[in-house]
Image: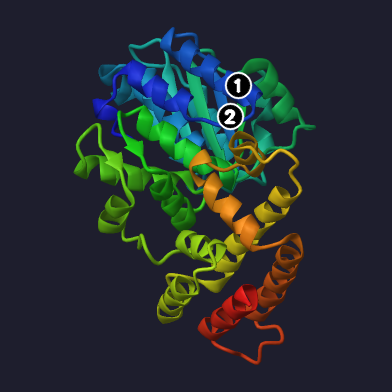
Amino acid sequence: MPNFQTLNENSWEFYLLGIIKLTQHVLDEIKALVADIRNKILKPIYFLMGDEPYYIDQISMYIEKNVLTEEEKGFNQMVLYGRDITVEDIVSNAKRYPMMADYQVIIVKEAQDLSRTIENLADYAKQPQPSTILVVNYKYKTIDKRKSLYKALQKTGLVLETKKLHDNKVAEWIRRVLAGKNYSIAPKAALMLVEFLGNDLGKISNELDKLQIILPEGTQISPQHIEDNIGISKDFNNFELCNAIGYRDEVKVHRIVNYFADNPKDNPMVVTISLLFGFFSKLLVLHGLADKSPRNVASALGINPYFVNEYMTAVHNYPMKKVSEVVSTLREFDLKGKGMGANSLPQGDLLKELMVRILR
């Protein structure tokens, strides 16, 4: 999470708005939400739901930090947790009047724990207390849009549904986050983070915060920075494995695979196969492109232009027929890695056999 104590209003808004890659509808809602809070145009209910908890946490924290003054928060700001309360408790607290302030703020965290009874909030949502700002964090789930609660919230409050960022968008998200704080990142370093942390934006944000504490403003974060401070090897990772396979560098491929075999907990086979499948799937797309200009390749494959030459080399080294064979082989070894028809071979041995099949 960013350090809100050191962020001024403008820099926080840039951070929140500049990095979010959602549908345009949701992005417009977030822009309107932040602008309204800044201008003290407040909704009585903010219902934040969906499978990307990062945005829910950020928006909820923005409301928590900005609606009331520090003096007002003591009597008028309350945080509740879904596992400890009922919907009736929420309503009871929401109907109270603020003390020596225009508003009270009630933030309900982990409200998904109330999923079986959340529809009971519908009556309150139809006639919410005007002096209460109720923020409901409903993570990993959504409410039924056909029922009364959603319809009431549409009329009296604000409903925001967040979605997970696609893996191929996360590296750009990282770049935007860092640009908003006057840092940059090498493309390989960004992909190392994506490979290691996936599309878990909360974990990625935490690691970026650690780097920003260590590195001076204006730094370009390199693969070496990632290795030294986060513990991800810059030489022995799935990104480097795909690169070595693409160049048919057998010595490097087997060096990486031997490292994976010696460190299976840090390099699960299922992740390696998944990333290899993505790599060769992109080669299939590339084979089918009539326009193989760098810009079109980057756009069609959803990759940083920095990596176009590597894919062009790989597509030269792996004809269409071979790529199709590799994709089929990856499916076979995915099943073997899950214990189907592999006679309980160690995953390191399976991975070595897979490399032989790919490179021959």
Q: Name the one closer to the observer, 342 or 20.
A: 342
Which circle marks residue 47 in the picture?
2
Q: Does the image show residue 279?
A: no
Give residue 151's quadrant in the image.
top right
Query: Dot 1 corresponds to which residue?
Result: 158
* Figure check: 190 above or below 299: below
Image quarter of the N terminus = top left
Which amino acid type corresponds to the residue marked 2 in the rendered image? Phe
Q: Earlier in the sequence, mark 1 or mark 2?
A: 2
Q: Does the image show residue 342?
A: yes
For label 1, count other residues whose C-alpha is less than 10 Å away and answer few (under 14), some (14-19) or many (20+): some
> Could you tell me which residue is drawn at 46 percent across and 50 percent down?
191
> Could you tell me which residue is drawn at 61 percent across and 78 percent down?
354
Q: Where does residue 56 sit, x and y in percent of width and height?
A: 51, 35
Residue farthest front in this picture:
316
Image quarter of the C terminus = bottom right
Give left or right: position of 284 versus 190: right
Which amino acid type corresponds to the residue marked 1 in the rendered image? Leu
Question: In what element is the residue under mark 2?
Answer: strand
Q: Name the one closer to the observer, 296 or 142.
A: 296
* Figure check: 52 above or below 342: above
Q: Name the one closer to the observer, 73 or 57.
A: 57
Q: Where does residue 284 sit, x and y in percent of width and height?
A: 72, 55
